[in-house]
Image: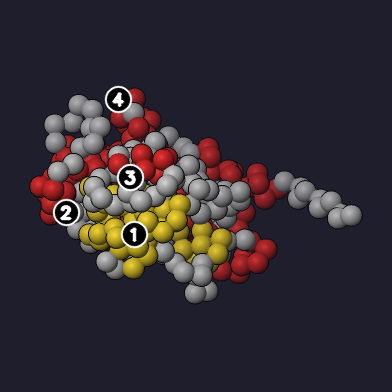
Protein backbone atom coordinates (compact mmCIF):
# COMPACT_ATOMS: atom_id res chain seq x y z
CA UNK A 1 0.00 0.00 0.00
CA UNK A 2 1.47 3.37 -0.97
CA UNK A 3 1.40 6.49 1.17
CA UNK A 4 -1.51 8.05 -0.71
CA UNK A 5 -3.60 4.93 -0.13
CA UNK A 6 -2.75 5.00 3.58
CA UNK A 7 -3.80 8.63 3.80
CA UNK A 8 -7.10 7.90 2.06
CA UNK A 9 -7.81 5.08 4.51
CA UNK A 10 -7.22 7.40 7.45
CA UNK A 11 -9.44 10.12 6.01
CA UNK A 12 -12.31 7.69 5.48
CA UNK A 13 -12.30 6.45 9.08
CA UNK A 14 -13.42 7.93 12.38
CA UNK A 15 -10.89 5.90 14.35
CA UNK A 16 -7.78 7.75 15.56
CA UNK A 17 -4.60 6.84 13.73
CA UNK A 18 -1.48 5.86 15.66
CA UNK A 19 1.95 5.29 14.12
CA UNK A 20 3.85 2.18 15.16
CA UNK A 21 7.32 3.09 16.39
CA UNK A 22 8.64 -0.08 18.05
CA UNK A 23 7.77 -3.77 17.96
CA UNK A 24 7.81 -4.77 21.63
CA UNK A 25 6.84 -8.45 21.75
CA UNK A 26 4.64 -11.01 20.00
CA UNK A 27 1.65 -12.53 21.78
CA UNK A 28 2.02 -16.07 20.56
CA UNK A 29 -1.09 -17.38 22.27
CA UNK A 30 -3.08 -15.75 19.45
CA UNK A 31 -3.28 -17.63 16.18
CA UNK A 32 -2.97 -14.39 14.20
CA UNK A 33 0.30 -13.49 15.95
CA UNK A 34 -0.77 -10.16 17.46
CA UNK A 35 1.88 -8.11 19.21
CA UNK A 36 2.44 -5.37 21.72
CA UNK A 37 3.72 -2.37 19.83
CA UNK A 38 4.78 1.08 20.94
CA UNK A 39 3.23 4.02 19.13
CA UNK A 40 3.23 7.80 19.27
CA UNK A 41 0.50 7.40 21.92
CA UNK A 42 1.80 4.56 24.08
CA UNK A 43 1.38 0.80 23.98
CA UNK A 44 -1.28 -1.05 21.98
CA UNK A 45 -1.94 -4.67 21.12
CA UNK A 46 -1.80 -4.68 17.33
CA UNK A 47 -3.64 -7.06 15.01
CA UNK A 48 -2.10 -7.22 11.54
CA UNK A 49 -3.83 -7.37 8.18
CA UNK A 50 -1.08 -9.67 6.88
CA UNK A 51 -2.04 -12.47 9.30
CA UNK A 52 -3.81 -15.58 8.07
CA UNK A 53 -7.33 -14.31 8.84
CA UNK A 54 -6.67 -11.16 6.81
CA UNK A 55 -8.46 -7.84 6.87
CA UNK A 56 -11.84 -9.33 7.76
CA UNK A 57 -10.61 -10.29 11.22
CA UNK A 58 -9.62 -6.66 11.72
CA UNK A 59 -13.03 -5.53 10.50
CA UNK A 60 -14.66 -7.84 13.04
CA UNK A 61 -12.44 -6.41 15.78
CA UNK A 62 -13.33 -2.82 14.94
CA UNK A 63 -17.01 -3.30 14.15
CA UNK A 64 -17.89 -5.60 17.04
CA UNK A 65 -15.82 -3.49 19.42
CA UNK A 66 -17.73 -0.38 18.39
CA UNK A 67 -21.09 -2.10 18.79
CA UNK A 68 -20.10 -3.44 22.22
CA UNK A 69 -19.21 0.04 23.39
CA UNK A 70 -22.48 1.45 22.07
CA UNK A 71 -24.31 -1.28 24.02
CA UNK A 72 -22.56 -0.31 27.26
CA UNK A 73 -20.02 -3.12 27.34
CA UNK A 74 -16.45 -2.08 28.22
CA UNK A 75 -13.89 -2.39 25.43
CA UNK A 76 -10.43 -0.77 25.61
CA UNK A 77 -9.66 2.10 23.24
CA UNK A 78 -9.70 1.03 19.58
CA UNK A 79 -7.42 2.70 17.03
CA UNK A 80 -5.92 2.24 13.61
CA UNK A 81 -2.19 1.58 13.59
CA UNK A 82 -0.09 2.55 10.61
CA UNK A 83 2.82 0.23 9.93
CA UNK A 84 5.53 1.89 7.83
CA UNK A 85 7.71 -0.15 5.42
CA UNK A 86 10.76 0.17 7.70
CA UNK A 87 8.90 -0.90 10.85
CA UNK A 88 10.25 -4.04 12.51
CA UNK A 89 13.07 -4.68 10.06
CA UNK A 90 15.44 -5.45 12.91
CA UNK A 91 13.24 -8.29 14.19
CA UNK A 92 15.24 -11.56 14.00
CA UNK A 93 12.22 -13.86 13.65
CA UNK A 94 11.52 -14.48 9.93
CA UNK A 95 7.85 -15.22 10.64
CA UNK A 96 7.43 -11.80 12.22
CA UNK A 97 9.35 -10.18 9.38
CA UNK A 98 7.03 -11.77 6.82
CA UNK A 99 3.96 -10.72 8.79
CA UNK A 100 5.05 -7.09 9.03
CA UNK A 101 6.02 -6.93 5.37
CA UNK A 102 2.50 -8.08 4.50
CA UNK A 103 0.96 -5.51 6.86
CA UNK A 104 2.28 -2.18 5.60
CA UNK A 105 -0.40 0.48 5.91
CA UNK A 106 -3.47 0.42 8.12
CA UNK A 107 -3.90 -2.20 10.85
CA UNK A 108 -5.86 -2.14 14.08
CA UNK A 109 -4.92 -1.79 17.71
CA UNK A 110 -6.50 -2.01 21.11
CA UNK A 111 -5.09 -0.16 24.09
CA UNK A 112 -2.68 -2.30 26.14
CA UNK A 113 -4.02 -2.54 29.70
CA UNK A 114 -0.91 -2.67 31.82
CA UNK A 115 -1.34 -5.02 34.78
CA UNK A 116 -4.54 -6.64 33.50
CA UNK A 117 -5.05 -10.37 33.98
CA UNK A 118 -7.30 -12.98 32.43
CA UNK A 119 -10.74 -13.50 33.93
CA UNK A 120 -11.09 -16.47 36.25
CA UNK A 121 -14.53 -17.14 37.65
CA UNK A 122 -13.07 -18.51 40.89
CA UNK A 123 -11.01 -15.38 41.52
CA UNK A 124 -13.05 -12.58 39.98
CA UNK A 125 -16.52 -14.02 39.52
CA UNK A 126 -18.15 -11.22 41.50
CA UNK A 127 -17.32 -8.82 38.66
CA UNK A 128 -19.56 -10.78 36.29
CA UNK A 129 -22.92 -9.67 37.65
CA UNK A 130 -26.02 -11.49 36.34
CA UNK A 131 -27.02 -8.44 34.29
CA UNK A 132 -23.54 -8.02 32.79
CA UNK A 133 -23.31 -11.73 32.01
CA UNK A 134 -26.75 -11.77 30.36
CA UNK A 135 -25.92 -8.72 28.25
CA UNK A 136 -22.64 -10.27 27.14
CA UNK A 137 -24.21 -13.64 26.32
CA UNK A 138 -26.83 -11.85 24.22
CA UNK A 139 -24.19 -9.74 22.48
CA UNK A 140 -21.92 -12.67 21.63
CA UNK A 141 -24.87 -14.64 20.26
CA UNK A 142 -25.87 -11.64 18.16
CA UNK A 143 -22.36 -11.19 16.73
CA UNK A 144 -21.73 -14.97 16.47
CA UNK A 145 -18.59 -14.81 18.58
CA UNK A 146 -17.25 -18.30 19.46
CA UNK A 147 -14.26 -17.02 21.44
CA UNK A 148 -15.69 -16.48 24.92
CA UNK A 149 -15.22 -19.89 26.49
CA UNK A 150 -13.87 -21.05 29.83
CA UNK A 151 -10.70 -22.12 28.05
CA UNK A 152 -10.33 -18.77 26.31
CA UNK A 153 -12.66 -16.17 27.87
CA UNK A 154 -11.18 -13.08 26.19
CA UNK A 155 -12.13 -11.09 29.26
CA UNK A 156 -9.54 -9.08 31.14
CA UNK A 157 -9.73 -7.85 34.71
CA UNK A 158 -8.34 -4.35 34.99
CA UNK A 159 -9.01 -1.70 37.62
CA UNK A 160 -11.68 -3.91 39.24
CA UNK A 161 -13.68 -4.17 36.03
CA UNK A 162 -14.13 -6.67 33.20
CA UNK A 163 -13.00 -5.65 29.72
CA UNK A 164 -13.86 -7.34 26.41
CA UNK A 165 -11.06 -8.13 23.97
CA UNK A 166 -10.40 -10.16 20.82
CA UNK A 167 -13.42 -10.20 18.51
CA UNK A 168 -11.59 -11.24 15.36
CA UNK A 169 -13.45 -14.55 15.10
CA UNK A 170 -16.90 -12.94 15.34
CA UNK A 171 -19.15 -12.28 12.32
CA UNK A 172 -17.87 -15.45 10.68
CA UNK A 173 -20.54 -15.16 7.96
CA UNK A 174 -18.50 -12.40 6.32
CA UNK A 175 -15.89 -14.91 5.19
CA UNK A 176 -18.34 -16.17 2.55
CA UNK A 177 -21.07 -13.62 1.84
CA UNK A 178 -22.25 -15.61 -1.19
CA UNK A 179 -23.77 -18.23 1.11
CA UNK A 180 -25.51 -15.79 3.45
CA UNK A 181 -29.16 -15.11 2.66
CA UNK A 182 -31.77 -13.62 4.97
CA UNK A 183 -32.67 -17.01 6.44
CA UNK A 184 -29.06 -17.79 7.33
CA UNK A 185 -28.58 -14.33 8.79
CA UNK A 186 -31.37 -15.06 11.28
CA UNK A 187 -30.09 -18.47 12.38
CA UNK A 188 -29.44 -19.34 16.05
CA UNK A 189 -25.92 -19.57 17.43
CA UNK A 190 -25.38 -23.05 18.93
CA UNK A 191 -21.85 -22.20 20.11
CA UNK A 192 -23.38 -20.03 22.81
CA UNK A 193 -23.63 -23.20 24.87
CA UNK A 194 -19.90 -22.92 25.57
CA UNK A 195 -20.01 -19.29 26.70
CA UNK A 196 -17.94 -18.70 29.84
CA UNK A 197 -20.68 -16.59 31.49
CA UNK A 198 -23.75 -18.51 30.34
CA UNK A 199 -24.58 -20.09 33.69
CA UNK A 200 -23.87 -16.80 35.50
CA UNK A 201 -26.26 -14.84 33.31
CA UNK A 202 -29.46 -13.30 34.57
CA UNK A 203 -32.73 -13.19 32.70
CA UNK A 204 -31.88 -13.28 29.00
CA UNK A 205 -35.28 -11.95 27.95
CA UNK A 206 -34.52 -8.78 29.90
CA UNK A 207 -31.09 -8.57 28.28
CA UNK A 208 -32.81 -8.88 24.91
CA UNK A 209 -34.94 -5.83 25.67
CA UNK A 210 -31.97 -3.81 26.95
CA UNK A 211 -29.55 -4.66 24.19
CA UNK A 212 -32.08 -4.47 21.39
CA UNK A 213 -32.87 -0.91 22.45
CA UNK A 214 -29.20 0.07 22.56
CA UNK A 215 -28.08 -1.33 19.20
CA UNK A 216 -30.22 0.63 16.77
CA UNK A 217 -30.02 1.18 13.01
CA UNK A 218 -28.34 4.51 13.77
CA UNK A 219 -25.72 2.79 15.90
CA UNK A 220 -25.09 0.25 13.13
CA UNK A 221 -24.69 3.02 10.56
CA UNK A 222 -22.26 4.97 12.73
CA UNK A 223 -20.15 1.88 13.46
CA UNK A 224 -19.99 0.96 9.78
CA UNK A 225 -19.09 4.48 8.73
CA UNK A 226 -16.12 4.34 11.10
CA UNK A 227 -14.50 1.46 9.20
CA UNK A 228 -11.63 2.38 6.85
CA UNK A 229 -12.18 1.79 3.15
CA UNK A 230 -8.83 0.06 2.74
CA UNK A 231 -9.81 -2.79 5.07
CA UNK A 232 -13.28 -3.13 3.61
CA UNK A 233 -11.96 -3.37 0.05
CA UNK A 234 -9.19 -5.89 0.74
CA UNK A 235 -10.39 -9.16 -0.82
CA UNK A 236 -13.75 -7.50 -1.42
CA UNK A 237 -14.90 -10.18 -3.88
CA UNK A 238 -17.59 -8.76 -6.16
CA UNK A 239 -18.32 -5.58 -4.19
CA UNK A 240 -18.02 -2.43 -6.30
CA UNK A 241 -16.87 -0.14 -3.50
CA UNK A 242 -16.51 0.18 0.27
CA UNK A 243 -20.05 1.50 0.73
CA UNK A 244 -21.39 -1.66 -0.90
CA UNK A 245 -19.46 -3.71 1.64
CA UNK A 246 -20.85 -1.57 4.46
CA UNK A 247 -24.36 -2.15 3.16
CA UNK A 248 -23.77 -5.92 3.18
CA UNK A 249 -22.75 -5.82 6.83
CA UNK A 250 -25.69 -3.55 7.63
CA UNK A 251 -28.26 -5.85 6.01
CA UNK A 252 -26.80 -8.90 7.74
CA UNK A 253 -26.71 -7.32 11.21
CA UNK A 254 -30.14 -5.75 10.74
CA UNK A 255 -31.56 -9.15 9.93
CA UNK A 256 -30.04 -10.61 13.09
CA UNK A 257 -31.47 -7.72 15.12
CA UNK A 258 -34.94 -8.04 13.67
CA UNK A 259 -37.33 -9.74 16.12
CA UNK A 260 -38.08 -12.48 16.78
CA UNK A 261 -34.38 -13.17 17.23
CA UNK A 262 -33.67 -16.87 16.81
CA UNK A 263 -30.46 -16.66 18.81
CA UNK A 264 -32.39 -15.69 21.97
CA UNK A 265 -34.40 -18.91 22.55
CA UNK A 266 -31.27 -20.89 21.62
CA UNK A 267 -29.33 -19.11 24.38
CA UNK A 268 -32.17 -19.56 26.89
CA UNK A 269 -32.35 -23.27 26.13
CA UNK A 270 -28.57 -23.66 26.38
CA UNK A 271 -28.53 -21.85 29.71
CA UNK A 272 -31.22 -24.14 31.14
CA UNK A 273 -29.40 -27.25 29.94
CA UNK A 274 -26.04 -26.11 31.27
CA UNK A 275 -27.53 -25.10 34.63
CA UNK A 276 -29.15 -28.54 34.98
CA UNK A 277 -25.91 -30.40 34.40
CA UNK A 278 -24.32 -32.10 37.39
CA UNK A 279 -21.11 -30.26 38.28
CA UNK A 280 -18.00 -32.29 37.72
CA UNK A 281 -16.36 -33.52 40.87
CA UNK A 282 -12.88 -32.21 41.47
CA UNK A 283 -10.26 -34.90 41.79
CA UNK A 284 -8.27 -34.77 44.97
CA UNK A 285 -4.66 -33.72 44.56
CA UNK A 286 -1.99 -36.15 45.58
Mark 2 surroundings within 10 Å by alpha-carbon count, few (fewer than 14), some (14 through 19), many (20 or more): many
| Horizontal arrangement in the rendering, residue 36 relative to residue 244 (left or right) | right
Residue 104 visible in the picture: yes
Separation (CA) of disc 2 from disc 3: 19 Å
Of residues 81 and 245, the one drawn nearer to the viewer in this rendering: 81
Residue contact between numbered discs 4 and 2, judged by CB atoms under 8 Å: no
Mark 1 surroundings within 10 Å by alpha-carbon count, few (fewer than 14), some (14 through 19), many (20 or more): some
Residue 225 in picture, x, y percent from top left = 19, 51
Q: Relative to residue 118, is residue 64 depicted above or below? A: above
| Horizontal arrangement in the rendering, residue 277 relative to residue 7 (left or right) | right
In front of the other: label 4 or label 3? 3
Mark on residue 22? 1
Of labels 4 and 3, earlier in sequence is 3
Of labels 4 and 2, earlier in sequence is 2
Label 3 SS: helix
Label 1 SS: strand
Residue 86 in picture, x, y percent from top left = 25, 50
Mark on residue 178? 4
In front of the other: label 1 or label 2? 1
Residue 217 visible in the picture: no
Tag 3 residue: 100
Of labels 2 and 3, earlier in sequence is 2
Residue contact between numbered discs 2 and 3, judged by CB atoms under 8 Å: no
Image quadrant assignment for residue 20? bottom left
Of labels 1 and 3, earlier in sequence is 1
Separation (CA) of disc 4 from disc 2: 29 Å
Separation (CA) of disc 1 from disc 2: 20 Å
Mark on residue 11? none
Q: Relative to residue 126, is residue 284 depicted above or below? A: above
Of labels 1 and 2, earlier in sequence is 2
Mark on residue 10? 2
Amino acid sequence: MNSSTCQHAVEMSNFPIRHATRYVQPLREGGSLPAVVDTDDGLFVAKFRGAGQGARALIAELLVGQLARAAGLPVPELVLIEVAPLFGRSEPDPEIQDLLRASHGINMGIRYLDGAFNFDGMAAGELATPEFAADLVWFDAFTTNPDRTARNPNLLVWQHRLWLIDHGAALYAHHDWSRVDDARARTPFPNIRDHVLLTRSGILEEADARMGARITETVLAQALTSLPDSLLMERADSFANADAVRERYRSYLSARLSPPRAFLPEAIRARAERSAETPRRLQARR
